[in-house]
Image (tube, rainbow, N blue to C red):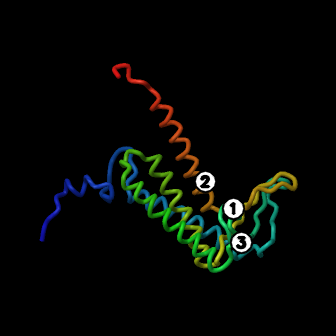
Amino acid sequence: MPSISRSAIAATPWSLRERTGSTMSVRAGCLFVALILVADIVTKAIVESSISIGQSIVVIPGFFSLVSVRNPGGAFGVLASLGEPWGKVFFVSAATFTVVLLGWFIRELPESERVHRAALFAVIAGAIGNVIDRLVYGEVVDFLDFYVGTSHWPAFNVADIAITVGVTLLVIMSFLGARGSRHVDPAS
């Protein structure tokens, strides 16, 4: 049986060996995903057990309420009209593809790219959290409702926050990277 050297294992992006310094290993990323998923699942369970669908509990009058709503579609209810089973099949398939693709991106990123890796792990956690809802309920459980007067932002959940924060970080990092790459080499 062929043996694999320790240095070969340590050099692979998927190495689970503990690292020192300022890096984000796959192990740390998986723990990050697990923490987000626990927060998402627990908050949704609390909402499920204490707020009826369609009910609203005002937390900050004129600004924030806890609600219990279901979203059969994507972000902002997009493609909600697909219905069962096509909506579930489409969104679960799209999320699964996204998780696999982002996992590949993480594998290709050096561990020292901790902000990029954390952002990708956050998006993965959010996608998994919403897939769990689709598999269990056939739709996503949303409960955070921000509004001013009668103008409401679409309700969302912890998984949506993870996706939004992850994507926002990736966009910011891409602008910062593009900005840094504008330097012209005078030798060329």
- Name which residue lies at 60% across and 66% down: 40
Three-letter code for the amino acid on which mark 2 is drawn? Thr
Q: Mark 1 and mark 3: span between their CA atoms?
A: 19 Å
Is the residue under label 2 in contact with that under label 1 (CB below 8 Å)?
yes
Q: Residues within 10 Å of mark 3 (few under 14, many from 20)?
A: few
Q: Mark 2 and mark 3: span between their CA atoms?
A: 23 Å
- Image depth: mark 1 or mark 3 in front: 3
Point out the tag, 1 or 2, that comes first from the N-terminus: 1
Residue closer to the observer: 48 or 73: 73
Residue closer to the observer: 101 or 129: 101
- Name which residue lies at 53% across and 57% down: 123
Which residue, given by chain and number where applicable, does mark 1 sit on?
156
* Residue projecting furthest to the top: 186
The secondary element bearing badge 2 is classed as: helix
- Name which residue lies at 24% across and 58% down: 9
Q: Residue 180 location, x and y as percent?
A: 47, 31
Point out the tag, 2 or 3, that comes first from the N-terminus: 3
